[in-house]
Amino acid sequence: MAYEPPYRFGPPVGAPFFCDREDELKLIVNRMRGGIHVFLLSPRRYGKSSLLEQASELLLKEGGRCASVNLLFCTSEADLASAILSAVVHSVLSGPGRAKHSLEDMLRRVRIAPQVTFDPDGKVSVTFAPAHSNQDWIGVLQDTIALLEDASEKGPAALILDEFQVVAGIGPKGVGGVFKALADQAKHTSIVFSGSHLSVMENLTRDKGAPLYGMGERVMLDVVPEEAMTKYLVRRARATGKKMSMTTARIIYHEADRIPNYVQQLALAAHEQTDGEITEAEVSRGADRIVDGQVNDFAERFEQLAPSQQRVLRALADTPTSAVSTKSFLDKIGVANHNAVQTALKALVKRELVYQTGRVWSVSDPFLRRWLRRPLD
């Protein structure tokens, strides 16, 4: 019999592992229905991809079309054009009812002829030779939006761009501004810009003069509230015949820094430590097992840091703080001035090792933090 774990982490999750987020899900689906653009922002592991997958499924069930693409591996304008066009073509061809145009008809409407391949499951992928000007790629993206706009005549249409922050690093100055023109063109298509590198996404969306300022509704995804998550943990444990108290569920929630993916990971590790009741002892053993499995990775990432960055990271592992400019903090990490701290923090943020909530700086991964707190052998 296949093992069915009570908790899931890593890839996007659906029912019964999708916890809370009803309000955010309703809002995003409503914006998709209405052709309104959305900016979905949160740190990694908060569940953006799971939320967007649920929204996409709901839109499809209603007869709409939703093209979804992860831009994480895009490094050029050609990559962007290929990835987005592939997602849109697949969405239009596989949407409800017969497509208004055949594959050949759709690709004839794209100003640069792509190379077409079919995955084993029949999914279409298109690629371009990297020998065209940037203006050609803008045109291809405009043609791609036009395909979705055409499809929206038969129902709501949406385009999800996950890991959107990568556009800031493509080209000499980034290509974020290109998407303003695309968003203007999408009169009936909702574009969902989703990103996890908050400082980059803020530069793209928040302030006047930002490439996408005022182009849609900003949704900041927070952690799942404690009551909802702890009740979920207890309920899923009981479904497997094991007991977990609300006290233990709260310990898991806070030991995992309330971050949904890590909460589920720690809950599963604790669940696997016993055939009976899951207590604080199982939580501690589960956390140690997770850390033990990642020691080599943590050590390698730590060794790649400059000494000042290592000291800042260890200091924040000991105590998250907003007082990074105080003399006591400077003395603790052995640097001469505030600028040195800011330089180290900037490098750690870029590596996604630390993050800032309000004014407080913390280590991004609770298991990395646990490893950093371990005494040296």
Image (tube, helix red, strand yellow):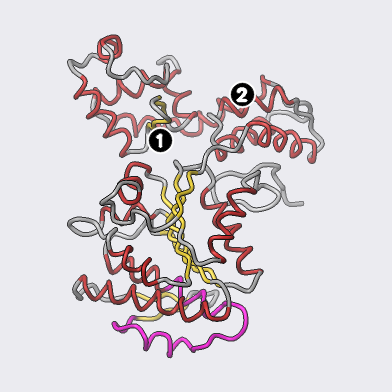
On the rendered structure, is 360 left or right of 333? right
Coordinates of residue 291 in the picture (x, y in percent): 50, 29
| Front-most of residues 285 and 148 | 148
User: Residue 80 appears at what percent x and percent y?
Assistant: 33, 66
- Crowding around mark 2 (Cα neighbors within 10 Å: few <14, some 14 to 19, many 20+) is some
Where 156 sits versus 302, above or below? below
| Residue at figure coordinates x 67%, y 24% from the top left | 282
Residue stretch rendered in magenta on the structure: 86-114
Element type where label 2 sits in the image: helix
Q: Is residue 278 left or right of residue 373?
A: right
Q: Which mark is residue 116?
A: none
Kind of residue at disc 1: Asp
The residue lying toward the viewer, choosing from 7 and 336, is 336
Residue 285, label in figure: 2
Residue at (63, 31) in percent of width and height: 226
Q: Which mark is residue 297?
A: 1
Q: Is residue 146 above or below residue 226?
A: below
Q: Is residue 267 magenta?
A: no
Please tell me which residue is depicted at 36% across the width and 58% down the height of the picture.
73
Q: Is residue 95 magenta?
A: yes
Q: Which of the 4 image quarters holds residue 240? A: top right
Identify the secondary structure beneath mark 1.
Answer: helix
Residue 370 position (above or below residue 27) = above
Viewport quadrant of the C terminus: top left
